[in-house]
Image: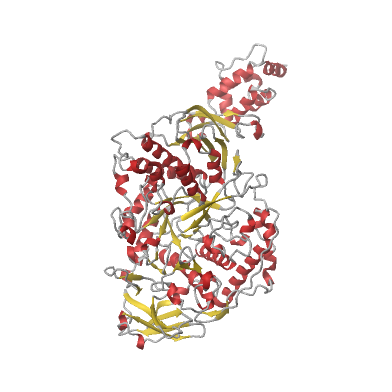
Amino acid sequence: MINCFGLNPLISASSTSIACITHKLGNKQHLATQKSVDLALGYRKSHGYGFSFGLRRSVHETVGSRFKGIAVMTDDKSTMSSTEEDLENIGIFRSDPALEPYEKHFKYRLKRYVDQKKLIEEYEGGLEEFARGYLKFGFNREEGGIVYCEWAPAAQEAQIIGDFNGWDGSNHQMEKNQFGVWSIKIPDADGSPAIPHNSRVKFRFRHGDGVWVDRIPAWIKYATVDPTRFAAPYDGVYWDPPLLERYQFKYPRPPKPKAPRIYEAHVGMSSSEPRINSYREFADEILPRIRANNYNTVQLMAVMEHSYYASFGYHVTNFFAVSSRSGTPEDLKYLIDKAHSLGLQVLMDVIHSHASNNVTDGLNGFDVGQTSQDSYFHTGDRGYHKLWDSRLFNYANWEVLRFLLSNLRWWLEEFKFDGFRFDGVTSMLYHHHGINIAFTGNYNEYFSEATDVDAVVYLMLANCLIHSLLPDATVIAEDVSGMPGLGQPVSDGGIGFDYRLAMAIPDKWIDYLKNKNDSTWSMKEISSSLTNRRYTEKCVSYAESHDQAIVGDKTVAFLLMDKEMYSGMSCLADASPVVERGIALHKMIHFITMALGGEGYLNFMGNEFGHPEWIDFPREGNGWSYEKCRRQWNLVDTDHLRYKFMNAFDRAMNLLDDKFSFLASTKQIVSGTDDENKVIVFERGNLVFVFNFHPENTYEGYKVGCDLPGKYRVALDSDAWEFGGQGRVGHDVDHFTSPEGIPGIPETNFNNRPNSFKVLSPARTCVVYYRVEESQEEDTNDSLVGVVEETFAASEVIEIPDESASIESEASNSDEVIETLAVADGEVAKIADAVESQDSNLDQVEETIAAAVESEVVRDELDDADN
């Protein structure tokens, strides 16, 4: 049995203890094997290695804002002062004692975090105030004019240019302060802003070699491109709409769900037509689909402006600007407000791990060869990601911290996002960025000189800020390394994320679908891959995301059915074996991933109904076509196509969690991984899940273990007609449990479960059973005592031998009956078990008691009682 509840709070117990930890490199994911874990203690072994973290002395960098100069990060040798006591009580060691050999590392990074936060409080008025940088930098309306500020220490001269001055900045020269911040106030003209709303602007500056360059302001809130010109550069846009044109939010944020069921979506490719979709079209046409399928969270990709559409939004050029391809900032606000009105939280895919290498349109244009302390990025190799062809931030820089933290606050407060999914966290955590590194689970891989503590401190500050501004925020980390503490609170020495993505799971499914025959699928390996995680840190599981569908790969449905999806999906003809197998496994793969793989679930747009083919953004290689960069909603909307079955099952999966909240339950117990019969049985919450992956065998009377005794019924059945199944499982059948072994002694139980019941398990199906509560049954509304008394009072049911006193006269009280019968073994044990369950059916109680009364042991005890 795999006990993920009691014995193993940090990682799942598994007989094989093998996990596939993926390493995301571009669009590829590499597999690594995780080493054995200590099942008894519930945490990984420390491997006996000593801690060898070298304290790196931070560079003293003097940077500034409009107001003050400050040293970036304190010297490593500065005194602990008042934080010394706090650093001696790091909570993460209580949950995982195996981390204690790395105490110096945790104290060092926690001290760096505390010191940095104190400096921000001293010089900026606190973290929240520090994160209001957008009110100081960029364009801001003040009394009598517009103030524009830009941090550009490398510039020798600077001007503001745009439509408002005919792109001639000679009359709009900016002034530079001692901290490298350029500023200018542009007075109103005749009582109106000198820079009209929605007009183009740029920052022009001369750098050291005398060259003048034009750049989009770093804090710009909107940027556009001329669609009629191929490869035209972007322009910054001054966005300050009149009051009547500003979108006013109408709906409050919905309550934070117990567990996120996330619909990952890309607005631009959400249209059924080969074109870019708009925010408003997505809000009106796609959000209702998401709500109808019972998701509670939407995760929006590609929101931040990115000049290269095919980057999927991951090469950001303008961090405070919404992607103009899909509309204006006001249009995005409409989308988010519409989502809130439907009860959907909205998360944003935020990219703070790197920035586009684009010089003309992006932040990289401010780098003109200056030192790292005067730039947003590191210099040399440390500032360049060779696989992503992008720039890497200097997280020790004061103004970089202001820029990124303010960016988070901007999206939360201006657009009412409910949280973030941080992309590329692995690249941030390590100096090697995870490139060509196979993480094995050895703790030395996480806590050494390879750890980028500057980035770790930034992420701690970011999570502290987010949860301070919005306590109900949901923040998810995309990390493939499995760093311990990533999902634990900052106050405990963790990095502070609410969830981490379970990134090994989709690669495991791809491996199985591409490389293994159905008959060789290992139930133990599937179960182990799904449950191998730290149980003090929540995970969001997914069977496939956008990564798995990028050009060169296929969706799960397409891997399963391939070319038959073009011709074999009509309900007007019998399904081919390929399609029948494909739909069945599509449902099973997504559902077991949801039910067993984490504390949240994610699905990428279209995969809920088995979207075919792959994703290919318009590019030179495909003739700039949008054909594969859209979602074919007509497939699921056409009633005679089988896509509707997968969509209906997806809806039912989410509805099941809505009703039973199994994702939020900490009770997760795998009791059976039957490789011979290809069956996995587990409990999540009080539900019992039975997955039969066998391609042919149907099992009648298959015995499954469970925790609680009573009556069980079908809650969800993938073989139901409405899901494209064959309707082989009866939904009106009651399944009664039988006690197994000695209560409280797991080794005497069935698969270490104290009760069991028998089910019909057809090939390639999954069925979920729920326990019928007393309130759900009219014949069990009475208390246990009432049931027992009624049972014993019925003379036609129980006949007592003449030489024995009747139960009615000598043991009218049910407690006395139980005490009288307690001396019997064998059959009497069944009585006690039946008595303890208020849901036991009357016939079972009567038959059990009658059999016990007839036994000689009971007769003797009743004689003694009569005497």
Q: Position of residue 103 (x, y in %)?
A: 68, 61
Q: Position of residue 249 (x, y in %)?
A: 37, 63
Left or right: 611 as drawn, with respect to 131: left
Instruction: Give the quadrant of residue 360.
Output: bottom left
For residue 619, say whether it is visible: no
Please say if 10 is above or below 129.
Answer: above
On the image, the x and y values in percent for residue 86 come to: 67, 65
Q: Kindly indicate the quadrant of the structure image that contains residue 585.
A: top left
Count up the numbered dots.
0
Looking at the image, which residue is at 53% across and 64% down? 428
> Quick one: 291 or 308, which is closer to the camera?
308
Quarter of the picture containing the C terminus is top right
Q: Quadrant of the N terminus?
A: top right
Is 70 placed above or below 693 here? below
Front-lying residue, 644 or 576? 576
Residue at figure coordinates x 48%, y 45% from the top left: 511
Left or right of 391 in this view: 17 = right
483 with respect to 819 (left or right): left
What residue occupies the far top of the structure in this picture?
A: 802
The percent position of residue 91, horizontal first and vertical second, equals 65, 58
Nearer the observer, 623 or 235: 623
What is the residue that sits farthest to the left in this orientation? 228
Please, is residue 38 above or below residue 225 in the view? above
